[in-house]
């Protein structure tokens, strides 16, 4: 280290030596008598306002970075700093002892030298008259001093025996004063002075031992303890006195803890509260005593902080062992949360005395709370899976006794609106447990576990959606999610109403119930430790985007269920049980050979699609009261799934475009009628999306292109728009059981005519271009 310092100093000296002339030249303008500061600044500081602002911004950023680096350096080297401070304090004590020893030895040698000198003078002076020529007043003074020297040790012994501390301290101070004056005036024989110094040092040590012993007694409390420690500090042993003070408070609360006996049947919160009261009150009293006796000296303050941190760690270990361990393992998040809240409440009271120990507690309690969180989420998942095995998938309102968890009635009242939706039994149970789960989010916020709670709940919801997917008959994802579902048997939803109920469960949970419950993560927990305002504001601003992203993930999980539902119904519609397709190219290609038998109606598969969509719309209207948009999107997605299948069925288009028989005029007319029928009933049902319109247009364009490749013009073969509109309208009225005309006029509220006209014109213009 010394070599490093020497090399750095040499480098600095060399740099100064090299830059000396340049520095002198730079300072010459300032040495002139005619130096004008204002003109100098104007000539040399030509920065504009923008550059000045950039420079100020740079300096502010540099200041923040420097402060952050200093804070990190302090935290990184804090333990080394405390250790070095203690070592320096010990070295100072040793140096003081060496200094006293050297002073004593010097006085002894000096006394011996003067004794030899006085003896030689008295032997050479034959008459000795001059020695006896002192006055009577001097003899009296010497005799009084000799008398004091004889009585002083006995006086100290009496004061020490009677434990009269203040008088003993005053006597010791008087002895030190006499020694100091004697050294200056040389009024005491060196041998007597040395004896006096030894006597003072011996009694001082004896008094220090008495004070230390008194401070260590459990019966020494309050003012008596502070008096003993203060007296020990006056004796010059401040570090030892401060350590004794802290140890005395520790011994006191450890003695009181003997009456605190935790048991497996006792309430964890009561044990935590009693233990926190003992320990943190002792820490607070120790902080007050330390400040009153030793002030705010850094060495004592650092030792107090380290001692308080150690006591906090011991407290956390006891709470984890006797209160948190069992509740965390069993998934008792509420019990663990109450213990943490109680501990933080007592610990936060120390902040007024300069001890911010809540972060220490939060760090130590975090693993236990995480364990309780995971166990709680696992219990939600397992309980919901057990009910899903017997769920009849029939929507109903929740039972009146919806809570059996012992929560206060106010909680049930606050969540009344959350239980007014119709769900199946497993979804009701899932919602109930989630609402109960979010009642215990206080410690999760203070420990920054809100994100972990949201992620865990998403995984549980995603697992529930996987079970709903498995409940769909013939689900293609059954094997993929078998392991994730925990090998749980799920009751199949056989009817369309039951299958739509699955979607009602997932959509209502993802769109309303879970996000509403998660909003309890938004407020800052007031009982937790209070951090700086910047941190709380940044957390409040960042939490809502996190919840919005979480909600998007929930909706994405519901979309998986919706896609599976639509794909399954599309396959059931397109294929027979034997695997044959209802949507084959032959149904259009063979029409030109059977012209006499043609009845112009939409193809059977598209009639079935219309009937299925109508039936589902009626079911959804009852299930999605107040949430008609979700029902509309479901019908839209199912229609798009069927049309996408047709658009991407390569074997169908290979037969149309390259088959042995081309697509004839009647086949094109029927194909166009089917596409027109899809657009008409989707528009009539208000689930015609732009994506569906685009898919239908692309399908029609491909069919016309295939027809044009035969050399015929598709526009000459297709009838006018009114012809297609009339057939589509008649088919929809016939299939839905509605009358064709009302009072001799067509239903003016139907958007079919206008949309159909727009559709046919757009397709034809698109194809011609």
Image (cartoon, rainbow, N blue to C red):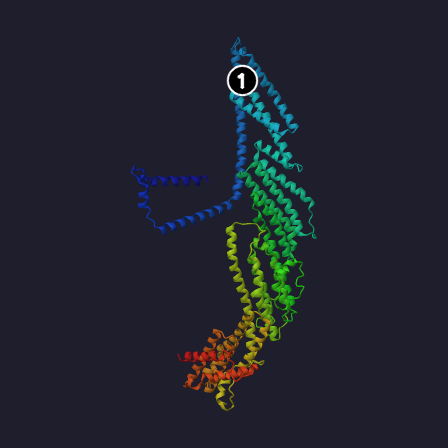
* Side of 158 relative to 194 (left or right): right
Q: Quadrant of residue 577?
A: bottom right
- Closer to the camera, 197 or 446? 446
> Which residue occupies the foreground of this view, 176 or 696?
696
Please, is residue 759 above or below residue 133 in the view?
A: below
Residue 349: percent from left, percent from top: 59, 46
Give the residue drawn at x 54%, y 33%: 93
Check disc 1 and report its element: helix, strand or loop.
helix
- Tell me residue 593's x, y (percent): 49, 90
Q: Position of residue 53 (x, y in %)?
A: 38, 50
Q: Is residue 354 above or below residue 91?
A: below
Residue 517 against residue 571 in the figure, above or below:
above
Query: Where is the C terminus found, in terms of image quarters?
Result: bottom left
Label 1: which residue? 115
Residue extending farthest to the front is: 743
Can residue 167 be spotted in the picture?
yes
Q: Is residue 22 left or right of residue 597?
A: left
| Within-10-Å neighbours for mark 1: few <14, some 14–19, many 20+ | some
Q: Residue furthest left?
A: 34
Q: Residue furthest top?
A: 127
Query: Does residue 574 show up?
Result: no
How many labels sit on residues?
Answer: 1
**Position in image of residue 492 (x %, y %):** 63, 72
- Quadrant assignment, res 615: bottom right
């Amino acid at each position: 280290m010394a070599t490093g310092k020497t090399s750095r100093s040499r480098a600095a000296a060399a740099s100064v030596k090299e830059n000396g002339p340049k520095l002198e030249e730079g300072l010459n303008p300032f040495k002139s008598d005619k130096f004008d500061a204002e003109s100098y600044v104007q000539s040399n500081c030509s920065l504009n306002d923008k550059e000045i602002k950039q420079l100020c911004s740079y300096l502010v950023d540099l200041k923040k970075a420097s402060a952050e680096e200093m804070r990190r350096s302090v935290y990184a080297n804090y333990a080394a700093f405390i250790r070095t401070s203690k070592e320096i304090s010990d070295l100072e004590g040793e140096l003081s002892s060496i200094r006293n020893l050297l002073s004593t030895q010097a006085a002894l040698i000096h006394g011996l030298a003067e004794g030899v000198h006085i003896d030689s003078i008295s032997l050479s002076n034959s008459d000795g008259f001059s020695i006896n020529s002192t006055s009577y007043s001097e003899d009296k003074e010497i005799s009084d001093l000799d008398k004091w020297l004889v009585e002083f040790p006995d006086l100290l012994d009496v004061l020490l025996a009677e434990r009269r501390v203040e008088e003993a301290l005053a006597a010791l101070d008087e002895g030190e004063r006499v020694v100091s004056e004697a050294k200056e005036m040389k009024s005491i024989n060196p041998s007597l002075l040395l004896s006096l110094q030894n006597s003072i040092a011996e009694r001082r040590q004896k008094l220090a031992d008495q004070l230390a012993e008194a401070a260590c007694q459990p019966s020494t409390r309050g003012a008596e303890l502070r008096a003993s420690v203060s007296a020990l500090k006056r004796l010059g042993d401040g570090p030892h006195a401060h350590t004794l003070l802290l140890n005395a408070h520790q011994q006191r609360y450890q003695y009181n803890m003997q009456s605190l006996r935790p048991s497996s049947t006792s309430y964890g919160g009561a044990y935590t509260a009693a233990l926190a009261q003992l320990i943190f009150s002792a820490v607070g009293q120790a902080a007050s005593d330390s400040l009153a006796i030793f002030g705010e000296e850094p060495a004592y303050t650092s030792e107090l902080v380290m001692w308080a941190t150690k006591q906090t760690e011991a407290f956390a270990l006891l709470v984890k062992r006797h209160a948190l361990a069992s509740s965390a393992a069993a998934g008792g998040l509420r019990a663990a949360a109450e213990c943490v809240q109680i501990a933080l409440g007592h610990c936060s009271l120390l902040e007024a005395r300069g001890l911010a120990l809540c972060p220490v507690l939060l760090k130590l309690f975090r693993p236990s709370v995480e364990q309780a969180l995971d166990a709680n989420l696992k219990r939600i998942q397992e309980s919901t899976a057990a009910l899903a095995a017997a769920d009849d998938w029939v929507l109903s309102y929740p039972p009146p006794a919806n809570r059996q968890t012992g929560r206060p009635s106010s909680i049930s009242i606050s969540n009344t609106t959350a239980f007014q939706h119709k769900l199946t039994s497993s979804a009701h149970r899932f919602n109930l447990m989630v609402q109960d789960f979010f009642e215990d989010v206080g410690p999760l916020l203070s420990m920054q576990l809100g994100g972990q709670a949201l992620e865990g709940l998403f995984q549980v919801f995603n697992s529930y959606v996987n079970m709903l997917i498995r409940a769909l008959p013939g689900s293609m994802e059954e094997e993929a999610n078998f392991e994730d579902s925990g090998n749980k048997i799920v009751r199949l939803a056989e009817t369309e109403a039951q299958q739509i109920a699955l979607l009602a469960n997932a959509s209502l949970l993802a769109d309303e119930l879970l996000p509403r419950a998660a909003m309890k993560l938004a407020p800052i927990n007031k009982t937790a430790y209070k951090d700086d305002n910047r941190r709380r504001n940044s957390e409040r601003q960042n939490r809502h985007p996190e919840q919005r992203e979480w909600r998007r993930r929930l909706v994405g999980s519901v979309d998986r269920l919706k896609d599976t539902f639509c794909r399954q119904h599309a396959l059931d519609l397109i294929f027979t049980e034997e695997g044959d397709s209802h949507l084959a190219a032959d149904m259009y290609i063979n029409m030109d050979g059977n012209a006499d038998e043609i009845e112009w109606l939409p193809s059977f598969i598209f009639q079935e699609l219309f009937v299925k969509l109508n039936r589902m719309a009626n079911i959804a209207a009852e299930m999605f009261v107040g949430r008609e948009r979700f029902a509309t999107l479901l019908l839209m997605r199912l229609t798009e799934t069927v049309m996408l299948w047709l658009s991407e069925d390569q074997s169908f288009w290979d037969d149309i475009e390259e088959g042995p028989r081309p697509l004839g005029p009647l086949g094109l007319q029927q194909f166009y009628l089917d596409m027109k029928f899809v657009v008409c009933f989707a528009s009539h049902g208000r689930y015609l999306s732009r994506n569906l319109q685009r898919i239908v247009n692309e399908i029609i364009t491909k069919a016309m292109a295939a027809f044009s490749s035969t050399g015929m013009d598709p526009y000459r073969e297709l009838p006018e728009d009114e012809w297609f509109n009339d057939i589509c309208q008649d088919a929809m009225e016939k299939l839905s059981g509605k009358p064709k005309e009302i009072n001799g006029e067509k239903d003016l509220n139907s958007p079919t005519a206008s949309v159909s006209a727009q559709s046919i014109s757009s397709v034809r213009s698109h194809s011609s271009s």
